[in-house]
Image: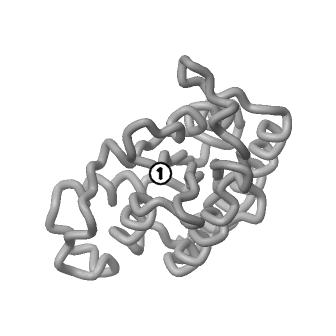
């Protein structure tokens, strides 16, 4: 049985390039034999700043947007967060989306595809790992880092990966598969 992988576009701002990077990664993930891959866009869920009256661990969701988000997250065995770096950290849209839920995230692995300027979003990737572990998500060591992303997206809004990106993506997907299979017993 194939593992369900969600590649999540974490930036929701107009003019973003995250969808270009995510589309590339998703195409790589769909070729991996172990995964049934879906591309998930946070923008589609239109999550306001956390507005649920109850703690997420209770799963007493009041709003349709939370219920839709919870259903999506719960259906996956593994995640890849495609995230930029904003002011040395992750975008507020990602932190907000993570904070909406708790049990749906538990005991699943996550990889990170980060992008940005010269640092390639590494600070964002490192900072979000603290939040991931609090949600009992296992963040992987392996990841994909895209430095100077603006130079790799053309006028048609297509991301042009380099060999290093492709090989890093394969290594991360292989590890995601190992961890997702191992963690199934804990869910």
Give residue 5's position: percent from left, percent from top. Answer: 56, 47
The relative height of residue 64 versus residue 140 in the rendered view (above or below) is above
x 52%, y 59%: residue: 86
The relative height of residue 91 versus residue 129 in the rendered view (above or below) is above
Instruction: Say which of 20 and 151 sits in front.
Output: 151
Q: Is residue 116 left or right of residue 101?
A: right
Tell me the quadrant of the picture where the N terminus can be found: top right
The relative height of residue 8 versus residue 50 in the rendered view (above or below) is above
x 70%, y 55%: residue: 176
Instruction: Say which of 36 and 39 sits in front.
Output: 39
Camera sees residue 177: no
Instruction: Say which of 74 and 42 sits in front.
Output: 42
The relative height of residue 35 versus residue 27 in the rendered view (above or below) is below
> Tag 1's secondary structure?
loop
Give residue 49's position: percent from left, percent from top. Answer: 26, 65
Mark 1 highlights which residue? 10
Q: How many marks?
A: 1
Q: Is residue 161 left or right of residue 185?
A: right
x 39%, y 45%: residue: 13
x 71%, y 64%: residue: 140
């Amino acid at each position: 049985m194939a593992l369900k992988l969600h590649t999540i576009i974490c930036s929701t701002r107009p003019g973003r390039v995250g969808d270009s990077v995510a589309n590339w990664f998703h195409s790589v993930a769909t070729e991996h034999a172990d995964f049934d891959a879906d591309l998930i866009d946070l923008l589609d869920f239109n999550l306001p700043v956390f507005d649920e009256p109850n703690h997420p661990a209770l799963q007493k969701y009041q709003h349709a947007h939370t219920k839709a988000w919870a259903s999506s997250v719960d259906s996956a065995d593994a995640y890849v967060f495609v995230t930029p770096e904003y002011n040395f950290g992750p975008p507020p849209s990602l932190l907000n989306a993570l904070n909406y839920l708790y049990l749906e995230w538990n005991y699943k692995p996550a990889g990170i595809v980060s992008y940005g300027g010269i640092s390639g979003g590494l600070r964002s990737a490192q900072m979000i790992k603290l939040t991931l572990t609090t949600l009992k998500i296992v963040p992987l060591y392996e990841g994909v880092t895209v430095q100077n992303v603006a130079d790799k997206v053309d006028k048609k809004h297509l991301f042009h990966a380099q060999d290093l990106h492709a090989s890093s993506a394969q290594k991360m997907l292989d590890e995601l598969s190992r961890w997702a299979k191992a963690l199934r017993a804990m869910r």
